[in-house]
Image: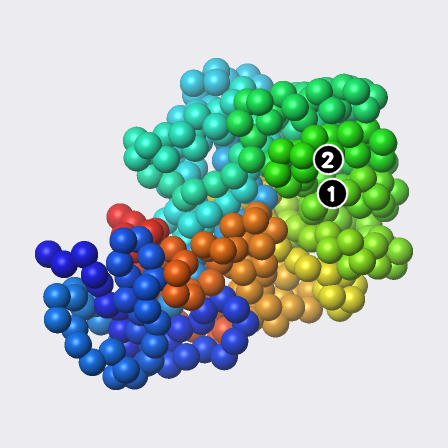
Amino acid sequence: MSSKTLYKGFTMIDGTGGKPVSNAWFLVEDRTLVKIGKGDELSSTKDVNVVNLDGKVVMPGLINSHVHITMEPVGDPFSLLMSESLAKTALRGVANLKKHLLAGTTYFRDLGAPGGVDLALWDSVNEGLIQGPEFLASCKVVTMTGGHGWPMGREADGPNETMKAAREQLKAGADVIKIMATGGVMTEGVEPGSPQLSMEEMKAAVTEAHKAGKKTASHAQGTEGIKNAILAGIDSIEHGIFLDDETIELMIEKGVYLVPTLVAPYFIVEYGVEAGVPKQAVDKSEMVMGSHMESFRKAHEAGVKIAMGTDAGTPFNFHHAAPHELKLMMDCGMTAMEALVSSTKISAELLGIDEEYGTLEAGKFADFLVLDENPLDNMDTLLDINSVYKFGELVK
Ligand SMILES: [Zn+2]
């Protein structure tokens, strides 16, 4: 059998934001898109396997910038995580990896996992022991004593300690450093709006990450904490619930990305206390949802770079649910095409993998989705993907 495969006859959405191309084709060899065209440009198909995708739509695999692969999206994921063995957590991660891949996520970024489980999962995917998307791992989140996410974090106070905390994660093998700038919804006793690690504390951790050539992401919901994170040199604001004009301007000026995760509070409110979500988390989510959407709308209008992330693993925020985030982003002002580009090209840029991933262009890896309908007309088609290809291989 030939090692070259020609896929043809489909409508291509290449992830760059350009117009869809009808009757498109590409040639895949050695995991990579080697040639792309349309119509009958490719004359010879000698020694080439041919796959007809007539009537289908092909787009790049989704890149989810904010996932918790070890978390189970039950009512109270933290309590479950803290009460089970790391072995069980790892097995949960194995199952969740498959869910992401089958739902069209071909790359993601994990932003907080206990006990090095994320790294072990990544090693296992890389060795071919288990099936899953590729991903970047943050290891433990850096948080102040008693701060947001502390049960699965590395508590650190003062710049010397946050520096050391970042170095510990880098030593362990982290690809990205996650830093808590504010309180959050899920941790009891902390408020989403209140600042936590100071600018100086975050700056010390960010500096270490950047020295090692790694990026940083900040859980940042309240305005003051968001500003602290931006001034500390952070690469992305996660959630960004209370953005004001000043923080939006600063984000544009410094090229900071927003990863909104609109679905996270949305599902907490949708399912509510009846489904087992702790009341304090439901109350806080109800309180912040309006501001969250308004902040997204303003940031998008102003031109902030927005990368798609779901916070999968939080209550009822399922590991296959990325399309719901795209739909919410559209409810808050994005066009369908903008939502797709945010979920492919822009996410790849934020993750620093855009030379090889994120768009369907010659020279990049053949990570793509085959859809029965055009998502520009009906985003729900992403909830029922025809087939997923990772490195040019059909995922089964
Ligand atoms: Zn998160």
Which residue corresponds to the image point at 77% horizontal and 49% vertical from the top-left?
Answer: 241
Q: Residue 252, position in %: x, y?
A: 78, 59
Say which of 101 and 35 sits in front. 35
What is the number of the mark on residue 234? Answer: 1
Q: Is 77 left, or right, of 380 in this rendering?
A: right
Q: Is 323 left, or right, of 206 in this rendering?
A: left
Label 2–label 1 contact, CB within 8 A: yes
Name the quarter where the N terminus is drawn: bottom left
Q: Which residue is mark 2?
A: 206
Residue 154 sits in quarter = top right
| Nearest to N terminus: mark 2 or mark 1 | 2
Residue situated furthest bottom in the rendering? 40
Residue situated furthest front in the rendering? 211
Say which of 208 and 292 sits in front. 208
Is residue 31 shown above or below 190? below
Q: Residue 270, position in %: x, y?
A: 62, 48
Q: Is 94 left, or right, of 25 in this rendering?
A: right
Residue 272 sits in quarter = top right
Q: Residues within 10 Å of mark 1 (few under 14, many from 20)?
A: many
Specify whether residue 88 is in view: yes
SS for callout 2: helix
Tell me the amino acid under the disc marked 2.
Val
Q: Is mark 1 within 8 Å of ligand 1?
A: no
Q: Residues within 10 Å of mark 2 (few under 14, many from 20)?
A: many
Is residue 234 shown above or below 29? above
Q: Residue 178, position in %: x, y?
A: 66, 34
What is the number of the mark on residue 279? Answer: none
Which residue corresponds to the image point at 80% horizontal and 58% vertical from the top-left?
Answer: 253
